[in-house]
């Protein structure tokens, strides 16, 4: 198996009690049974449709043929299946044809899809994001024009942001929009690069949610507007070309099944873009989707890591090699490598990072549900926590996913480096996540430069209060006192370091120089909090657990200990560095390299 | 450029004073001029022959066609060129046609070749290793039969160790050897897997230095013998097939230009193997070559990392994106990304790890030269230091090379993930090094379980004495007192932790449970020592340096500071973990995962 249904249900029902969401009116039609049906359906599609294509989609890359990108021939059926089964608009309202599914459950399904075959899961995921922008900010006319075909999986949605000279620096985009005679319609001209699913033959049309600058608007980020720019537009009731040409396809190290395109917009007959919402609000709108997408990216990273973890676990249990350290008689049979301490370390590392991250991401999804469907202070606090945790939920799993997939390769040794096993593919795929939807460096700046002090630091206060509550809960179990105290110390370090850094804020260059390390530090403490919560539930359940459940809870307690012993301990070094006055990265000159 | 000639000469002539080697009789014919000619020749071949094939060798993988592996058509000329120019036997004696070139200079050349195109450099490197085994332990007859064609680059040499059921556990090989009527000739039967350059059409023959067990010999490692098993053997003066069949080729994540083969030996008409040296001494012989190969692997890791570093440095200097943190006016032009602190951090990380590692590996090569060509205590001490440092020199650069190439990808962002730039290839190639020539886990066991206590711990005593000398030298410069004191503390931590762990040696399972972390810890301290030496030289040279040299020495001093601030600081966490009494990896059960 490529994920653990048992573990997923542990997070949802034992740690988070996700079924409580159904007490909110928006989710009232759901119950645990319907949640489970959704998850079972996700697992079923994943096993039967997605996983069988994992390898072949990597080997047979999409190609640009006669100006159109050709993807794996079965993707059309897969995307339609996502549409037919209602996945693409599942979180949206019943009125829109959706299922009002909590983000918590939707993201749990995303986790399953991504673990089965990340490339194939990218297509519907992007369309959900694009339609969400349209329905949140677009006119009814735009919604009616585009979303039905997108919900059906017949039209692809994308996010079209990046340009050759504007990647991380979105304020520098140059794609232009010029009003036409028709209100709301603009002539779009420019280039977009790295557009995921930006063109392919598995759908009949592609709708780009594209950033562009209306001529004469303000400079920089304040002049960016959002447009729906379809590859083909309706004219007198029939689809005609909209002058969005595919100039190239990028070949990538991994997740090769999902193409990324270089688009030329309006360089010929002219491309029409439909303004979404108000002019000059594009970046704000886009960030709503980006924030959701960022939690999604974190989840994708955990998915790929989890698939690699289970592949390496299976290998470690089956592969005989060597003997216990205390047993040197070569006549004795070899033992499975899972018996070796260092292999167990490599497996525990993966388990601790991935299950801790999965907990955090589901927690963030739960906050999204409360923020969206809850009331008053509960909703407000959830929104603050989500805002604060988003850079961590995106970046920690992404950065660590590179290391956990590397550990999976290492468990297999030479075999792991060959294409005979899927772990090398997971290693290549995992490397994208620290890059897309904002690099780790960008998220470090976001966390320390913005999120920590947002709303007078209330997000941090709420988080620390939640952490303190987790400590108090854990301390009801004598077995967990030690871990609980360590989290207490870590929080105290986090507070000290944060206060120290905020004291430097008058010079933003110095203040933010190590923001990436601060993000890492904050991420580790956050994961330690997640693990304490998981350990508390496991410790409470263990005495009466039987059979597989007993092993499951024991595994949870060991992974929690592992996280504290091998990962939380890394904060000792980070605390030291983050308070150092040696600003070597600032003092280095470009020509001294 | 893919490496820095200036930096290489800094290590060789300013830090190590490699020209002193020419005072030893074995190297007396050399001088600094001849060393430089060798390095210039290596750079010249690398630029003109190897680097142009970097990408194409990755894209057009070797293929198995009609039972033979076909490699890139230009490889034949390249390997012959290595032969013609005398690279393959350069370290060997004049009597053998060699040049008595110091390992220090040979490995510096290896560094250049690997940075240009690692895959292509593998072929001659393997032949050198194989011929070294033959000349060290084989009869004159065997040497005469095989080595001339190998030195000429016409026959390939390999190390044929791994079998389907014996990877890390070499004592479990089952390939058998049965004496024939001809003394020294045995009938070999078995399978070998993952044999680098084990078959290809760029050479006329392949000579496998193969481990096998003579029937009736002792069980386990003590029954392993070494054979030369050619793909084609001479019979009545003509080359005939020797029943070494290529059963398959493995496809790998990286360094795709160098094929690894699955060989069936003696499954048909019969394969003849020629016993090298004495029966049952095969593992001991092989470890001599493995130890050299291990320093070579560390060097290859640094090579690939260095190529990635310079590719990312070039990009960072040229790519405009964003503005300084203190400059928010969108009307101002974008700045090259090297101006951003986090990009400089990613670059300094690479520089600090790679130049520190290069120093260590050249230092180890220097010890190899002293051990081989020096006298008395000097030679003995050098051998002890080399023995101690080999697991570190192999593993630290290999493990860190995965992270430095990842940092290079991150500098390029989305561009780095595409095949438009070489960094994604370097990222894939770097991942092999923690696996081959012994996994990192194996080297951890070797260091803590064997090397630290070998010869009554004399290796560690010598190393600590060298480190203390470096501290004393550094303290003559007030600017370096702070770094010197930190190294002093780190040594004290290393001693404390080592003593603590040796106190657990009565229970080897507990003693060695975290040997990999101990290896990491020891590696960081070792690199800090290397950096203090480099900083001391740079600090002394700086006051009178001009122009480029001034920038060079400033860069060295900054990289040293970076290493201490961001890398040495990690030992704080490692010291804590290594003395913890929570043996979570030992207590974890296989069925709790």
Image (cartoon, coloured by chain):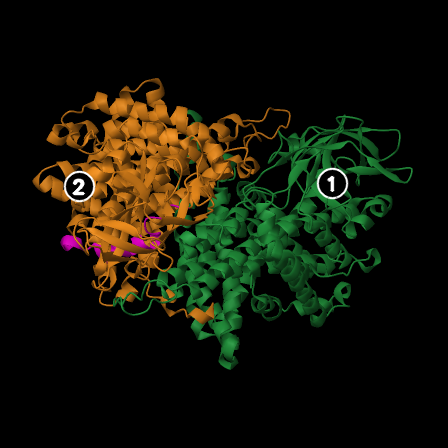
Chain colours: A orange, B green
Tell me if residue A379 comes above or below residue B457 in the rendering: above
Label 1 sits on residue: B209
Name the front one of labels 1 and 2.
Answer: 2
* Depth order, front residue of A159/B246: A159
The chain letter under disc 2 is A
| Badge number at residue A141 | 2
- Side of B268 where B409 appears, left or right: left
- For the question of whether residue A499 can be seen, the reply is no
Most frequent secondary structure within the magenta stretch: helix
Q: Which residues are magenta?
A: A432-456
Q: Quadrant of residue A418?
A: top right
Instruction: Give the residue displayed 24% in from the left and 27% down from the top.
Output: A14
Mark 2 neighbour class, 10 Å CA radius: few under 14, some 14 to 19, many 20 or more: few
Towards the viewer: B336 or A377: B336
In the displayed orientation, state which residue is furthest to the top.
A546
- Give the secondary structure at mark 2: helix
Does residue A450 show up magenta in the picture? yes
């Amino acid at each position: 198996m490529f994920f653990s249904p048992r573990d997923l249900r542990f997070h949802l029902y034992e740690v988070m009690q996700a079924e409580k969401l159904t007490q909110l009116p928006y989710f009232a039609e759901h119950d645990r049974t319907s949640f489970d049906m959704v998850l079972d359906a996700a697992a079923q599609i994943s096993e039967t449709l997605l996983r069988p294509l994992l390898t072949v989609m990597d080997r047979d890359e999409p190609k640009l043929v006669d100006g159109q990108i050709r993807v794996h021939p079965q993707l059309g059926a897969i995307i339609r299946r996502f549409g037919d089964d209602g996945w693409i608009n599942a979180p949206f309202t019943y009125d829109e044809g959706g299922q009002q599914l909590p983000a918590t459950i939707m993201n749990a399904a995303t986790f399953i899809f991504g673990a089965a075959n990340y490339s194939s899961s990218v297509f519907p995921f992007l369309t959900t994001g694009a339609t969400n922008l349209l329905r949140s900010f677009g006119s009814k006319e735009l919604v009616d024009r585009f979303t039905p075909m997108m919900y059906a999986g017949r039209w692809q949605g994308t996010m079209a942001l990046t340009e050759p000279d504007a990647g991380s620096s979105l304020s520098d985009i140059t794609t232009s929009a010029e009003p036409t005679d028709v209100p709301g319609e603009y002539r779009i001209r420019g280039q977009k690069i790295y557009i995921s699913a930006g063109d392919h033959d598995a759908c009949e049309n592609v709708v780009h949610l594209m950033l562009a600058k209306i001529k004469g608007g303000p400079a920089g980020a304040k002049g960016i507007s959002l447009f729906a720019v379809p590859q083909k537009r309706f004219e007198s009731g029939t689809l005609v070309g909209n002058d969005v040409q595919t100039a190239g396809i990028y070949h990538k190290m991994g997740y090769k099944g999902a193409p990324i395109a270089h688009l030329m917009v309006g360089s010929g007959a002219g491309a029409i873009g439909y303004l979404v919402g108000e002019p000059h609000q594009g970046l704000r709108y886009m960030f709503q989707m980006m924030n959701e997408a960022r939690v999604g990216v974190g989840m994708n990273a955990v998915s790929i890591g989890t698939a690699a973890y289970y592949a390496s676990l299976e290998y470690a249990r089956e592969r005989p090699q060597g003997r216990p350290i205390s047993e040197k008689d070569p006549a004795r049979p070899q033992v499975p490598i899972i018996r070796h301490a260092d292999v167990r370390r490599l497996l525990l590392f993966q388990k601790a990072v991935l299950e801790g991250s999965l907990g955090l991401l589901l927690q963030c999804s739960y906050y999204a549900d409360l923020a969206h469907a809850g009331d008053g202070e509960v909703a407000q606090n959830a929104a603050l926590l989500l805002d604060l945790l988003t850079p961590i939920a995106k970046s920690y799993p992404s950065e660590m996913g590179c290391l956990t997939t590397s550990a999976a390769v290492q468990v297999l040794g030479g075999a792991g480096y060959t294409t005979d096993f899927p772990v090398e593919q997971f290693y290549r795929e995992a490397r994208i996540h620290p890059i897309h939807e904002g690099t780790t460096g960008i998220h470090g700046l976001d966390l320390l430069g913005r999120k920590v002090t947002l709303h007078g630091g209330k997000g941090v206060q709420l988080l620390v209060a939640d952490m303190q509550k987790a400590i108090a809960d854990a301390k009801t179990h004598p077995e967990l006192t030690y871990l609980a105290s360590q989290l207490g110390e870590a929080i105290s370090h986090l507070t000290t370091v944060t206060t120290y850094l905020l004291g430097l804020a008058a010079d933003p260059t110095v203040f933010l120089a190590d923001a990436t390390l601060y993000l890492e530090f904050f991420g580790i403490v956050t994961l330690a909090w997640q693990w304490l919560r998981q350990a508390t539930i496991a410790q409470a359940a263990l005495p009466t657990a039987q059979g597989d459940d007993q092993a499951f809870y024991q595994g949870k307690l060991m992974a929690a200990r592992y996280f504290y012993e091998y990962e939380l301990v890394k904060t000792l070094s980070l605390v030291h560095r983050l308070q150092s006055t040696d600003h070597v990265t600032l003092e280095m000159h470009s020509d001294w390299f």
